[in-house]
Image: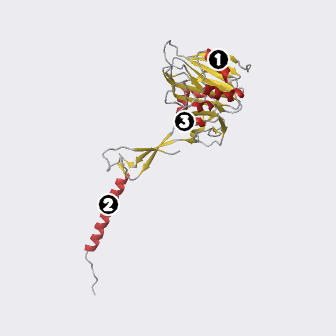
Amino acid sequence: MIIALFALQLGSLVAPAYACGCGAMVTDRAQAIGVDRETSAVRWDGRTEEIVMRFTVRGNAERAAWIMPVPSRADVRLGDAALFDALDRLTRPAHVDRHYFWPRGGDWPFTDGDTDGAGAAPPGSAAGDVGVVGRERLGPFDVARLTAADPEALSGWLERNGFELSDRLATELRPYTDRKWEYVAVRLAPDDEGAVLRGELDPLRIRFASDRPVYPMRLSRLAKTPQSLHLYVLADHRMEPRDTIGGARPEVRFAGPVQPEGAVADLTGGQRVYLTALRQEFPQPARIDGDHELKAVADTPYRETLYSDRLLTVGDGVPVWLLTVAGALVSGVAAVVAIRGRRRSPTVGSAV
């Protein structure tokens, strides 16, 4: 899963970096933060979108800020950590045994062991101001919901709260301010004084009105290393990106209707939904040219299949090929004996 997050730090980038499909993370110049893993789930019901994300971070930063642009006023709360384990179980590949007849390397008589080979099948504020429309403490997060007419105003707000916004990031925020999007700005800080941000953080759940499902990706173009995006989408139909937005072709890992339970049911309201799991690579992040817009496609189910190639056996593991060869040899010997027996038999003639 998964999801995929890039970490931007002024003057220092901790590798490996993963795509932050939802925003940018900044910290103090003297500190470093890396995001080892980001998993995202998108729920869209035709009117409202919810994005749940979980961060796994490392580094020496005692605090950091993360920014996510959203198309409308957002509600932010803590998510359920069990959600992604449940989604992983629902989309787990199918395992199928695939038998072969003749022995291969690793099978007797080519080895003394009894190992099996395995393979995988291919498959609104005033100009210059920042409006704070809400602020709350959620676990380790200090969450502020902001409106800003320009990136410079947002940069000023961050600086007043102990962070700096790079010139490049401010530039990339311009398309969002031009469209009058709002922002979720999150301060990440450990509960214990002097502790650093490390390990798996509580997931965040962000909800906003949207007449089309969108997954913000544009800020990932600032990443310096290849990026990966892993995304779960829960909607009425199978959902796929409209285009590649500068990355490789998105790969569908799972698609099919599911009856949600537990944390997944809490996200969907208990309704039966179509779940799509996507994976996409961005070898050159600078080519990312927009946000992912998701569209409904034909509800063709798909599940990855992992094949275990096994030698065909019977009984207590006796190879079928060996029985076949032995049977052929026995039949051949019996045929030879029978032919020789006929040739040695005396010929009886009739008397005249």
Rounded to the nearest angstrom, the CA distance separating label 2 from label 3 is 49 Å
**Which residue is at the far top?**
193
Confirm whether residue 269 shows in the render.
no
Q: Earlier in the sequence, mark 2 or mark 3?
A: 3
User: For mark 1, does the 10 Å Cα neighbourhood hold few (<14), some (14 to 19), or many (20 or more) residues?
Assistant: many
Left or right: where 294 falls relative to 14: right
Residue beneath disc 1: 157
Rounded to the nearest angstrom, the CA distance separating label 2 from label 1 is 86 Å
Which residue is drawn at the image coordinates 67% and 28% (left, top)? Answer: 174
User: For mark 2, does the 10 Å Cα neighbourhood hold few (<14), some (14 to 19), or many (20 or more) residues?
Assistant: few
Q: Nearer the viewer, residue 266 or 227?
A: 227
Image x and y of residue 209, in percent: 70, 27
Q: Element at badge 3?
A: loop
Q: Quadrant of residue 53?
A: top right
Kindly identify the amino acid type of the residue bearing the numbered disc 1.
Trp
Q: Nearer the viewer, residue 74 or 109?
A: 74
Q: Quadrant of the C terminus?
A: bottom left
Q: Which mark is residue 200?
A: none
Q: Element at badge 2?
A: helix
Residue 98 against residue 128 in the figure, above or below: below
Closer to the eye: label 2 or 1: 1
Which residue is drawn at the image coordinates 67% and 16% (left, top)? Answer: 134
Residue beneath disc 2: 329
Image x and y of residue 184, in percent: 64, 22
Q: Quadrant of residue 65?
A: top right
Q: Nearer the viewer, residue 121 or 291?
A: 291
Residue beneath disc 3: 91
User: For mark 3, does the 10 Å Cα neighbourhood hold few (<14), some (14 to 19), or many (20 or more) residues?
Assistant: many
Left or right: where 201 falls relative to 131: left
Image x and y of residue 267, in percent: 62, 27
Q: Quadrant of residue 237?
A: top right
